[in-house]
Image (cartoon, rainbow, N blue to C red):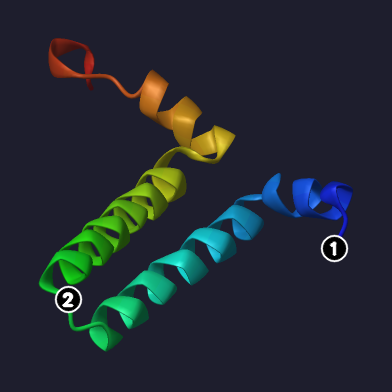
Amino acid sequence: MTIEEISKFLSTHNGRDKVIRTLFYTAKLASALTSSEETVFKLETISGQLSACRIVLRLFDDIPMLNYTLTYGLGKQVE
């Protein structure tokens, strides 16, 4: 893969999600296969952070959802 292909792949939501998901499952697998408690803790921390990253990207990556979030009324202004 060239740098242009990688850049194009990562410029889409699906591309970023696939890379993060692959890293997440790799960290999970590595933590299951290692015997060092410290390494297991570090890999579990990494996988947790990657999982949280995927959630945030799913919530705020697309423009319509961001627009809806910004225009959603709160309190007395809501009908």
Measuring from the top left, give residue 44's x and y in whole percent: 22, 65
- For this orientation, the residue located farthest to the front is 36
Identify residue for label 2: 36
Horizontally, residue 61 falls left or right of residue 6, namely: left
Secondary structure at numbered mark 2: loop
Could you tell whether 25 is left or right of 40 in the image?
right
User: Which amino acid, by three-letter code, is at mark 2?
Assistant: Ser
User: x and y percent of residue 54 in the render?
Assistant: 41, 54
Above or below, 3 relative to 29: above
Seen from the viewer's position, the closer of residues 5 and 44 is 44
Relative horizontal placement of residue 63, taking residue 38 as reference (left or right): right
**Image point (62%, 59%), residue name:** 14
Residue position marked by numbered label 1 in the rendering: 1
Work out which residue is located at the far bottom of the displayed protein and give it: 33
Among the two numbered marks 2 and 1 on one chain, the one whose residue lies closer to the N terminus? 1
Most foreground residue, 19 or 61: 19
Could you say where residue 36 lies in the image, as x and y percent from the top left? 17, 76
